[in-house]
Image: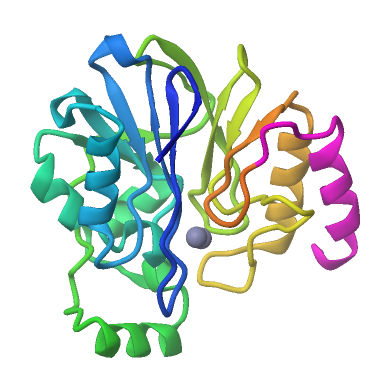
Amino acid sequence: MAQITEGVYFIQGQDDFIPDSHAYVVGKPGSQDLSLIDAGLMGKGMYKIQSILNMGIELKAIKRIIMTHTHLDHIGCLAEIREQIPWAELWMHDIEAGPLEEGDERTVYGMEMFQNMCMMQYNLKPGAFAFHVEGRLHGEENLDIGGMTWDVLHIPGHSPGSIGLYNRLEKILIPGDVVYADYAIGRFDLHGANASELKNSLLHLAELEVDILLPGHNRIVTDLPAGYIADTATQWAPYLV
Ligand SMILES: [Zn+2]
Ligand SMILES: [Zn+2]
């Protein structure tokens, strides 16, 4: 785990047969009000917890887990992590919270063929991802957490309830799987995905000043060129109709 700035820590995903999402811990160290952003793939829970401990962060300082979205590679080890920090609340966008609480796992798995393969590979039972959600986000919130302000942006398209977290002061964007480094964007062929919504979400993000891009996979970027997200949106626009 690496410190990006004072109050933002990066835990690199440990890819398996399936990619493991990165996780981030946000909040000023003295606040005792930290948030874990995303969990990761099945079997990676102890790795994520150990990475947090290795940074000298006390687990009891983690007050909530905020999901950028509920795809399997982000939520797979949520139960493992919650066993270690059972007091932490679970926050996510309302649109993905409802189905999750009802045991509708279509967004988690994304497609039926993938669901069958994963359930066999990881011995998952139906209902493995039915969680109670304590915090339902809608976008447009300004969260004052951990001594920092994070704007919640609803950026659907990769999944219906994808959110980004944006720190205006330090120009940090955590966009989940909506936009990555190297002009890559999230896939838009899974359950609940929508290409034109993804285009609008990229255009929404393009309005922000972003220096530090902390996506769900692949490289993180700490010196993002101006106009990067706008350029990415332009490159992909012909495919996002
Ligand atoms: Zn992902
Ligand atoms: Zn995803």
Q: Is residue 71 left or right of residue 32?
A: right
Q: Position of residue 6 (x, y in %)?
A: 46, 17
Q: Position of residue 126 (x, y in %)?
A: 19, 77
- At a point 65% along the width and 62% down the height, the residue shown is 194
Foreground residue, 236 or 194?
236
- Image position of 65 with respect to 147: above or below: below
- Taking the image as drawn, is residue 9 in sight? yes
Foreground residue, 65 or 226?
226
The number of numbered badges drawn on the structure is: 0
Queried whether the magenta region covers residue 135, the answer comes back as no
- Image position of 154 with respect to 62: above or below: below
Q: Is residue 67 left or right of residue 170?
A: left
Q: Quadrant of residue 222?
A: top right
- Image position of 207 with respect to 48: above or below: above
Q: Position of residue 56 (x, y in %)?
A: 25, 28
Queried whether the magenta region covers residue 233, the answer comes back as yes
Q: Is residue 53 left or right of residue 114?
A: left
Q: Is residue 223 left or right of residue 149?
A: right
- At a point 24% along the width and 67% down the height, the residue shown is 43
- Taking the image as drawn, is residue 71 in sight? no
Q: Quadrant of residue 59?
A: top left
Q: Quadrant of residue 158?
A: bottom right
Foreground residue, 125 or 24?
24
- Image position of 108 with respect to 36: above or below: below
Stretch in magenta: 221-241
Q: Which quadrant is the N terminus positioned in?
A: top left
Q: Position of residue 141 (x, y in %)?
A: 48, 22
**Image coloring type:** rainbow
Q: Which quadrant is the C terminus positioned in?
A: bottom right
